[in-house]
């Protein structure tokens, strides 16, 4: 993983430096980042450590060719499930957060579902059908969905608690539900259109789909999100979606925001 190269170009800045005062409704075309700041926003990874590693190399190369300024890595959640190496993805993100970089890791609905399984395997067993079985395999636990029984589910829960490193549990427990910078609000899934941005419920930020995706009105911030898979990045007047289904498409998308520019790396 290219930590040394990334660390050379990306520095940590406080949240306070990046926030702007509330303004009127903002469209994608008018939205901008604070002066002197650049954001690299990464969509849903879903266990694809290989894609994340190569994307970090491209980010480092891109950053090296641009004007030097404070840069931020913003991950939109869904690091686990479906792909082959959820454990490896968490290892990589944990190492990134130990560096001097400003790394923001948001919570996805899959991390929420995994937490529910850890707290109560039977109550949270639906996670296994969301791709949690692949996450279990990355921790050395094989639980075929076709052969699930209550006994096997409970046993898998015990094994996961035993095999899950403390650093992984702490990482999952510390994830943020949203992050604001400039004219943008970064979340995993979206927002409830009829609620103020500071009155959103975490469940909506992690799970909402149609009500948010079909809303055409502007918000106080442009919403940058993942969660809903699309064949290519989607730029609407009020939002930008970047979940390109990395676990099966082999495409992990990175949105680069600088000034009024919005580019796909």
Image (cartoon, helix red, strand yellow):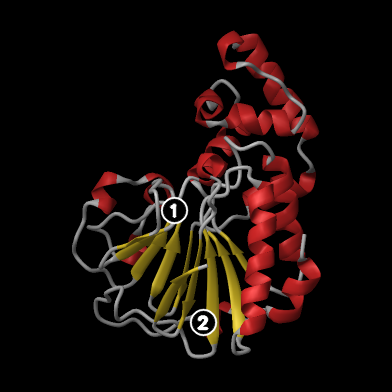
When asked about the image quadrant of residue 12, the answer is bottom right
Give how far apart the Cα atoms at labels 1 and 2 are.
22 Å
Disc 1: which residue: 226
Q: Is residue 81 left or right of residue 34?
A: right
Q: Is residue 216 left or right of residue 33?
A: left
Across and down, in percent, residue 120 comes to: 60, 27
**12 above or below 207?**
below
**Earlier sequence position, callout 1 versus callout 2:** 2
Task: Name the one closer to the observer, 144 or 175.
Answer: 144
Across and down, in percent, residue 247 comes to: 55, 41
Task: Name the one closer to the observer, 105 or 237.
Answer: 237
Q: Is label 1 in contact with label 2 (beta carbons under 8 Å)? A: no
* Disc 2: CA contacts within 10 A as few (<14), some (14-19) or many (>=20): some
When asked about the image quadrant of residue 92, the answer is bottom right
Per the rendering, the mark at residue 250 is none
Across and down, in percent, residue 39 comes to: 53, 74
Across and down, in percent, residue 88 comes to: 73, 45
- Which tag is nearer the camera, tag 1 or tag 2? 1
**31 above or below 116?**
below
- Give the secondary structure at mark 2: helix
Q: Is residue 157 left or right of residue 241?
A: right
Q: Residue at x 59, y 85 (%)?
A: 66
**114 above or below 78?**
above
Q: How many marks?
A: 2
Q: Residue at x 72, y 42 (%)?
A: 87
The N terminus is located in which quarter? bottom right
Disc 2: which residue: 18
Q: Residue at x 41, y 46 (%)?
A: 229
- Give the secondary structure at mark 1: loop
Q: Residue at x 30, y 81 (%)?
A: 30
């Amino acid at each position: 993983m290219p930590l040394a190269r990334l660390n050379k170009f990306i520095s940590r800045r406080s949240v306070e430096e990046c926030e702007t005062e509330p303004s009127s409704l903002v469209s994608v075309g008018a939205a901008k980042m604070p002066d002197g700041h650049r954001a690299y926003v990464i969509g849903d990874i879903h266990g694809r450590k290989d894609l994340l590693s190569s994307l970090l190399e491209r980010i480092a190369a891109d950053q090296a060719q641009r004007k030097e300024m404070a840069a931020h890595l913003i991950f939109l959640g869904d690091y686990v499930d479906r792909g082959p190496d959820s454990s490896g993805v968490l290892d990589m993100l944990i190492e990134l957060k130990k560096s001097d970089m400003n790394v923001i890791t948001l919570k996805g609905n899959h991390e929420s579902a995994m937490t529910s399984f850890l707290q109560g395997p039977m109550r949270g067993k639906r996670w296994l059908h969301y791709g949690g079985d692949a996450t279990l395999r990355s921790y050395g636990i094989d639980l075929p969905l076709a052969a699930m029984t209550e006994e096997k589910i409970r046993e898998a829960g015990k094994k996961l608690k035993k095999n899950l490193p403390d650093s992984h549990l702490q990482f999952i427990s510390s994830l943020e539900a949203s992050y604001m910078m400039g004219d943008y609000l970064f979340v995993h899934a979206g927002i409830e259109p009829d609620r103020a941005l500071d009155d959103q419920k975490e469940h909506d930020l992690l799970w909402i789909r149609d009500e948010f995706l079909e809303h055409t009105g502007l918000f106080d911030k442009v919403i940058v999100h993942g969660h809903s898979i699309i064949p290519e990045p989607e730029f609407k007047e009020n939002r930008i979606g970047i979940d390109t289904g990395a676990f099966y498409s082999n495409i992990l998308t990175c949105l680069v925001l600088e000034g009024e520019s919005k580019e796909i790396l």
